[in-house]
Amino acid sequence: MVDLRARLEALAHNLWWCWNPEAGALFRALDPERWSELHHNPVHLLAELSDDTLHARVALPRLHAVEAQLHDYLGSNSTWARRNVPALESPVAYFSMEFALHESLPIYSGGLGVLAGDHLKSASDLGIPFVAVGLLYREGYFKQVIEYGGQVAAYPRVPLDVLPLKKLDVVVEVPHGKGHYKATAWEIAVGRVKLYLLDADLPGNDPIHRELSRHLYGGDDSTRIRQEVLLGIGGMRLLRALGIEPSVVHMNEGHCAFAVLELMREQIALGKKPGAALAAAREKCVFTTHTPVPAGHDRFSWDLKNQALMGLRAEMGLPEGYLMELGREKPGNLDESLCMTVLALRGSRAANGVAALHGEVSRKMWAHLWPDRQLAEVPIGHVTNGVHVPSWIHPRVSALLDRVNPGWRDGAPVDLSEVSDAELWAIRNDLRFELVGYARRRTGHKTLISQSLCIGFARRFAPYKRGSLLFSDPDRLARLLFRHPIQLFYAGKAHPRDEAGQAIIREVLRWTREERFRGRVVFLPDYDVELGRRLTQGVDLWLNLPRRPREASGTSGMKVPLNLGVNASVLDGWWPEAYDGTNGFAVGKPVEYASVGEQDAADAESLFRILEDEVVPEFFDRDAHGIPQAWVARMRRSLETCLQAFHTDRMVGEYARRFYLDPSAAR
């Protein structure tokens, strides 16, 4: 008979547990305090607890029930994929530079990783044949420490023996310059999906190659191109070494585009000419672009490309300028760098943005790559992003939906018409109470109250996201905050090399210390998956304030409606597809402005007007039972209109039907 520890470890080593509430509760019950301190990491927790402690604290019926759930989940033959895309038999290979699966696995930075992690979870839930490829980072992305009025980056090393990793007995050669270095890989089980993480920190490799497995988005452009070679070329070679022949290679952002070159190399080795080899590679690849901001597209100079890929180019028998030309917006312009997005677009049979508006922006941005086509015929479509609902919805809300809409987990529409205002408001109060308690513990602010209107702003502090827009009129903000009990929760990081983003964080921190805002404006440090989950479950109102049209999607806002929260957002990214006038608020107007200053001023005025004239009156105007009926109506509509439309089950199903199956799909 398998002993108790082995049974628990088997559960802990499949991340299915992190979106199954019963499994999470099973581990939490072993030691709630250490569970919290260890970032909800069951592998680490089990390593600390003795066998006697496990036998004393494990409820065997609960363990058996969770094991049975996992067994049924993994063994089910009745999946969405079998019913809807039975022809998809060979696995899709999904490449991404980062994956945010859980806070205990720090191999992610922000929204791109969250989207990738949620994509894997829904692919597993839907039963789609699926593998994923990324990189292992021993120090992950940086931890944010707030000192001296600003952000300080810390890089703690994560012990691999307390992560749900399985070391694979495989070694691949990765090209660099005229030679190669070696990489191995680790496996993570994500439900039915396998995630493979390449690791170059091996004895015998030069330090410049070993450091590729240290930081996510660390180092300079030389480090970045070597990491992208490891991901794209090393990742394809890893799949071959594991005997995996993918039906599709899905490149999540341009970081992965060197996979196209490896597919070309294989075809050339089979005797095809370069043009035919590229065409064959193109038929294998689909590409998702995530940014309408020019600075977000990686570009590498001739020298960097040559240092990384001269040997591969020679092996492929290509002339010196060939690889650069594949990534140049204007072939023949020798002063132009290699753009990874251009390489991915030229090397893919289908490409898409991540919202309808982002698809339009992307077609305009890259139309010059197809000079013989009208704008509407530029082959970049869109698949609007979603979020993995089981990972982000609060158990109180999912229990409510199980009771009143039992088919919601299988995609049935959500209808809360039979639920009373009193019940919805009670749940919202409880979720806000949990957030305020968490914020008190995390910050030490004892004056935070759960009866307040809680407003959240949390995201990467890139300048275009306008993290300090509310402070453009601090006197007006102060009057608003003290007219009623209102609390603003801020969180987010700026890349250590992003001076402008760090300056915005310093500005927000400065206002939190000013007497009139103390206890009303709070900055929660080290934004991660857990903090994102706490905020999106607890806040009443979520702000998203990008300079339109620079937000590709904005998935953080999609999590708020799942938890009876409401969005106030610029009509950018996903929000134009969601907003209907009853389920949230639209900040600003979808028009073009003469200058950034004019746009910021107009959007700030719109935001203040919405808060003063709509949000605050609706939230604080209570009936005889203390219920804000107008606000609860908006909460209700927010959940009903957004949950299924912005679920990654819908998103991944759309990819499967439109992009994974049909080789001609481009729109």
Image: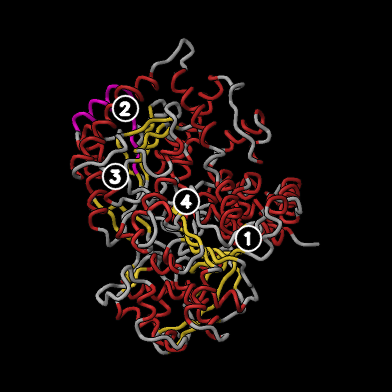
Tag nearer the camera, 4 or 2? 4
Q: Mark 4: which secondary structure?
A: strand
Mark closest to the chain's N terminus, 2 or 1: 1
Q: Residues within 10 Å of mark 4 (few under 14, many from 20)?
A: many
| Front-lying residue, 425 or 592 | 592
609 vs 177, left or right, is left
**Residue 525 visible from this viewpoint:** no
**Residue 64 visible from this viewpoint:** yes
Query: What residue is disc 4 on?
Result: 382
User: Residue 5 is drawn in which quadrant?
Assistant: bottom right
Q: Are marks 2 and 1 in contact (CB under 8 Å)?
A: no
Mark closest to the chain's N terminus, 3 or 1: 1
Q: Is residue 151 above or below residue 277?
A: above
x and y percent of residue 460 in the render? Answer: 35, 51
Q: Give the CA separation, mark 4 to mark 2.
A: 30 Å
* Residue at 31%, 44% in the rendered image: 548
The numbered dot on residue 193 is 1
The numbered dot on residue 610 is 2
Q: Amino acid at mark 3?
A: Arg
Q: Amino acid at mark 2?
A: Ile
Tag nearer the camera, 3 or 1? 3
Q: Which residues are magenta?
A: 474-490
Tag nearer the camera, 3 or 2? 3
Mark closest to the chain's N terminus, 3 or 2: 3
